[in-house]
Image (cartoon, rainbow, N blue to C red):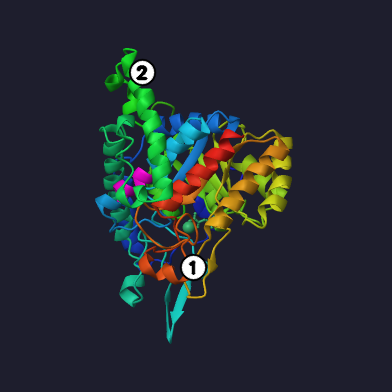
C-alpha cells in the first residue's frame, strides 16, 4: 500500500499475486477495452445500502449471511442458481425467526469465478500444465487448450455475472421471495430430512403470524418488506485486470466503485499490505472483506484496517476469520483485543470452511460438519469473552444434493463422498447441511 494518490490503475505499480500469465497480451488489452465500455453490474447506491446494513451487523443489530459456491461455473443451470438462492433464503428465515435478528443476505454469486491456487502448475504423469484458476481464466479439463488463460473468458464472466444477477433480481423482486411462500422454498431433497421437518414447523409458525396480521387488517400483499428481499452479490476480487475494467466513477458522489459486485473481498493469499490487491481495493468505496487465516499477526490485521479504512467508517471493513476449529479459540482472541483497542469498527465474520479442509482416505478434499460447527461455536465464544460482536457467517454451499462435506444430519461418510462429488474447487455444504448449520447458528445467535 502506498500513501501516494490512488487511481484505478495504481495497483499496477505493486506486486500482484495469483494473476494468470496471459499468452496473448494484445488480446487481453483488447478485451479489457471492451469490458471497460460495458454497463456496470451493480450501482453505487446499492453498495452504500449494503454498507449501512453491514454497519448494523457490526453493532450486533443484524447478522450477515454470506454464502454460495466456492467456484461458480459458467455452465451452472438456472435451476441450480434458483436452488442455491432458495437454501440461502431458507437459512435466512431460520436465522431471522429463531435467531431474532434481521439478516443481511450476501451471495458468493454472480461473479465468484476466480480461484487462488497454491501452485501455478499441476502435474499429472509426465504432463505439467497451468493450474485451473476458475472459469474466468481457463477450464478445468487437463489439456493444454483447456488450461490456457483465455482473455475472452473475462467477457464471458461479465456476461454470466449479468445473467445470474438478472435471475437473482427476478427471484428476489418478482414474488419468489415472498414470505407467504416460505413453504415452497423447502425443496424436496431438503424437506425430506429432519432439518427440513424442523424448517416446516417454523414455516407454519410464520404462516400463523402472517394470518394473524391479515386478520388484523394489514394488507400483506402490498408490504415490500414481506414480498421482496434485499440480496447482495460478492466475490473475491482476485483478477485485478477484470476488477479495474469494471470500476466506475459514481456521478452522485464523484467516488470510485468497483461495479462488478456490491461487496468485494481480499483472499487469505493476497492480503499483503504492500501488495496490489490491498492497493486496488483501498480506493474503491464498496464495502470490503478480508480473509484472516491462522498465520495473521496483530500487526497484519490492524494494518489492514488502517489501509482499507483510515476514516474508521462503520460497515466498510468485514474481517472474515478462517482459523480452523482447533485454532480459533487461541488465535482469534488476541486479534479481537488488538482491533478493539484501536477503535476500528469491524464486522467480524466466521468462515468455518477454509481452515477445516483435509483429504479423506479415498482422495476427496472434504470438511467435516462437526468441525464447521465447532469453529463457529469457538467464534461466538471468543467474541463473548472479548466483549465484541459475532457479526456473521461465510459459507460455501449449494442447493444441489451433493456429497462433498462429511457428517451432518445424514451423517455422510467417507465412502459416500464419491456419490455426488461435483465441486470444481472446495467441498460445499449441501442444502440439508446448510439448513442444519442455520439452526445451530440460530441457537448461538438467540443467546448472543
Ligand atoms: C475462498 O473463499 O474460496 C478462498 C479461497 O478462501 P481463502 O482466501 O480464505 O483461502
Ligand atoms: Co473455497
Distance of label 2 from label 1 (alpha carbons): 48 Å
Q: Quadrant of residue 115?
A: bottom left
Quadrant of the image occupied by residue 417: bottom left
The residue sitting at 36% across, 64% down in the picture is 422
Where is 355 relative to 88, above or below? Answer: below
Which residue is labeled 2 in the image?
A: 213
* Whether the residue under disc 1 has CB within 8 Å of ligand 2: no
Q: Identify residue for label 1.
A: 365
Q: At x 48% / y 41%, what residue is drawn? A: 65
The magenta-colored residue range is 81-87
Q: Residue 72 occupies which quadrant of the picture?
A: bottom left
Relative depth, front residue between 429 and 203: 203
Query: Is 183 covered by the magenta stretch?
Result: no
Q: Position of residue 136 (x, y in %)?
A: 36, 58
Q: Position of residue 276 (x, y in %)?
A: 54, 53
In this view, the mark in front (2 or 1)? 2
Quick check: is the Cβ at mark 2 less than 8 Å away from ligand 1? no
Q: Nearer the viewer, residue 55 or 420?
A: 420
Amino acid at each position: 500500500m502506498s500513501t501516494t494518490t490512488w487511481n484505478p490503475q495504481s495497483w499496477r505499480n505493486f506486486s500482484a499475486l495469483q494473476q494468470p500469465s496471459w499468452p496473448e497480451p494484445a488480446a487481453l488489452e483488447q478485451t479489457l477495452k471492451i469490458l471497460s465500455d460495458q454497463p456496470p453490474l451493480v450501482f453505487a447506491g446499492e453498495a452504500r445500502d449494503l454498507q449501512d446494513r453491514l454497519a448494523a451487523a457490526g453493532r450486533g443489530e443484524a447478522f450477515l449471511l454470506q454464502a454460495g459456491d466456492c467456484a461458480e461455473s459458467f455452465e451452472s443451470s438456472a435451476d441450480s442458481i434458483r436452488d442455491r438462492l432458495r437454501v440461502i433464503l431458507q437459512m435466512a428465515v431460520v436465522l431471522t425467526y429463531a435467531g431474532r435478528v434481521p439478516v443481511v443476505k450476501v451471495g458468493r454469486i454472480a461473479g465468484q469465478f476466480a480461484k487462488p491456487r497454491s501452485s501455478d502448475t499441476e502435474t499429472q504423469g509426465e504432463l505439467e500444465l497451468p493450474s485451473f484458476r476458475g472459469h474466468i481464466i481457463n477450464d478445468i479439463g487437463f489439456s493444454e487448450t483447456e488450461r490456457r488463460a483465455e482473455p475472452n473468458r473475462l467477457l464471458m464472466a461479465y456476461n454470466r455475472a449479468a445473467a445470474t444477477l438478472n435471475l437473482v433480481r427476478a427471484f428476489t423482486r418478482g414474488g419468489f421471495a415472498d414470505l407467504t411462500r416460505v413453504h415452497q422454498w423447502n425443496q424436496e431433497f431438503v424437506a425430506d430430512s429432519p432439518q427440513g421437518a424442523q424448517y416446516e414447523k417454523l414455516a407454519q409458525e410464520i404462516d400463523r403470524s402472517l394470518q394473524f396480521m391479515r386478520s388484523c387488517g394489514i394488507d400483506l400483499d402490498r408490504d415490500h418488506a414481506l414480498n421482496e428481499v434485499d440480496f447482495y452479490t460478492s466475490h473475491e476480487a482476485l483478477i485485478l485486470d477484470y476488477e479495474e475494467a469494471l470500476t466506475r466513477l459514481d456521478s452522485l458522489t464523484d467516488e470510485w466503485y468497483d461495479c462488478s459486485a456490491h461487496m468485494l473481498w481480499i483472499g487469505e493469499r493476497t492480503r499483503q499490505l504492500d501488495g496490489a490487491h490491498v492497493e486496488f481495493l483501498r480506493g474503491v468505496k464498496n464495502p470490503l472483506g478480508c480473509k484472516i487465516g491462522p498465520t495473521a499477526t496483530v500487526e497484519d490485521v490492524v494494518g489492514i484496517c488502517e489501509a482499507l479504512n483510515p476514516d474508521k467508517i462503520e460497515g466498510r471493513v468485514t474481517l472474515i476469520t478462517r482459523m480452523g476449529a482447533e485454532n480459533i479459540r487461541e488465535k482469534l482472541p488476541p486479534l479481537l483485543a488488538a482491533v478493539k483497542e484501536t477503535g476500528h469498527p469491524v464486522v467480524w465474520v466466521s468462515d468455518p470452511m477454509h481452515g477445516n479442509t483435509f483429504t479423506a482416505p479415498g482422495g476427496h478434499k472434504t470438511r467435516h460438519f462437526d468441525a464447521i460447527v465447532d469453529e463457529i461455536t469457538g467464534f461466538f465464544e471468543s467474541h463473548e469473552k472479548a466483549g465484541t460482536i459475532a457479526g456473521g457467517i461465510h459459507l460455501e454451499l449449494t442447493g444441489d444434493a451433493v456429497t462433498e462435506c462429511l457428517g451432518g444430519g445424514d451423517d455422510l461418510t467417507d465412502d459416500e463422498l464419491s456419490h455426488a462429488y461435483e465441486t470444481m474447487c472446495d467441498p460445499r455444504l449441501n442444502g440439508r447441511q446448510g439448513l442444519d448449520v442455520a439452526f445451530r447458528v440460530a441457537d448461538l445467535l438467540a443467546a448472543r
